[in-house]
Image (spheres, rainbow, N blue to C red):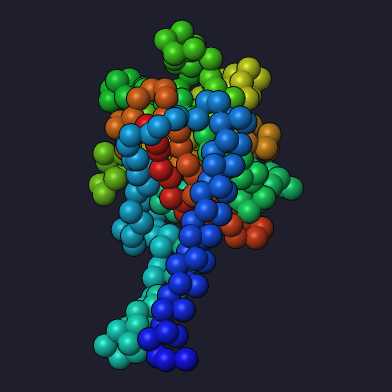
Amino acid sequence: MCDLCVLESVKDRMMSRRGLFKSAVGAAAAMTVGSAVGTRPALASAAQDVHDLTHTLSKDFPTFGGPSGYRPEQVANFAENGYNMFTLVIDEHTGTHIDAPLHFSADGASVDELPVGQLICPLAIIDIAEKAASDADAQLTPDDIKAWIAAHGPIPEGACVAMYSGWAEKVGTDLFRNADKDGVMHFPGFHIEATQMLLEETRAAAIAVDTLSLDYGASADFATHYAWLPAGRYGIECVANLDKLPATGATMIVGAPKHKGSTGGPARLMALV
């Protein structure tokens, strides 16, 4: 067989396989979309915008404990090795990250055990920025939840209820931790009564904050952590760009880490609107 004939034969087979592959992918996508629509009616449809809700992690990112939780070490560089590579040492609860149930319970689910269906969430964003501007110890209360429900309807099933306090704007400054002379931090969080209300009256999958902790900074007992996480729900801390989203109607995709036995870890969050 001539070289040209061989080339044409190979080309025909490749085009045939490519067409078959495209057909299979298209069918699978259609099945996936159909399944999602059938099981999650609250998901945003025909999304026009995608928003990044994740802070860029660096050695300078503030942490709850103080010292950096991100320690990269370059072990290969392009000039000497022909490629770049880093070894990363990252504390689980650093940057925009997930708190798995195991974080505050003896035997709760680790981050790799979170049901994948809970990682796609309708977003219910409750704005407490006005009171947080005048009170660093402001907390999201049952009254804030009731006001949101009165304006927007019930908290959707499987939702992530996110507190927007405006605190994300302080990242990169000492005001994000906002520690006083005694080392006590002052920033907003969920009041335990609001947490209990969500547990008892909704089927929300997660709560989220734009601060360093689900509990407000001056908390001495981590009441919200101890109530929410052992109930099998998860939390997200240090969320960015909540001010870019509507109070309702957005869908969050949680790029959770899948480290066996982990109590949490840095996550990539995206919102579809």
Q: Identify the residue shown where x is 36% and y is 56%.
A: 57
Residue 171 in the figure: left or right of residue 220: left
Which residue does the image show at 59% across and 57% down from the upper left? 258
Residue furthest right in the image: 107
Residue at coordinates 48% horizontally, 16% vertically from top-left? 145
> Percent from the top left, x then y, of residue 100?
60, 46
Q: Is residue 16 visible?
A: yes
User: In the image, is residue 1 above or below residue 215?
Assistant: below
What residue is shown at x 38% (from left), y 22% (from top)? 247
Tell how many labels.
Answer: 0
Q: Which percent across, then down, holds residue 212?
A: 42, 42
Q: Is residue 106 left or right of residue 135?
A: right
- Outermost residue toward the top? 150
* Residue 119 shows in the view: no
Choose between 181 and 207: the one closer to the eye: 207
**Picture quadrant of residue 177:** top left
Residue sitting nearer the eye, 107 or 22: 22
Quadrant where the C terminus sits is top left
Residue 98 picture location, percent across and down? 52, 46
Depth check: give the residue in front, 136 or 252: 252
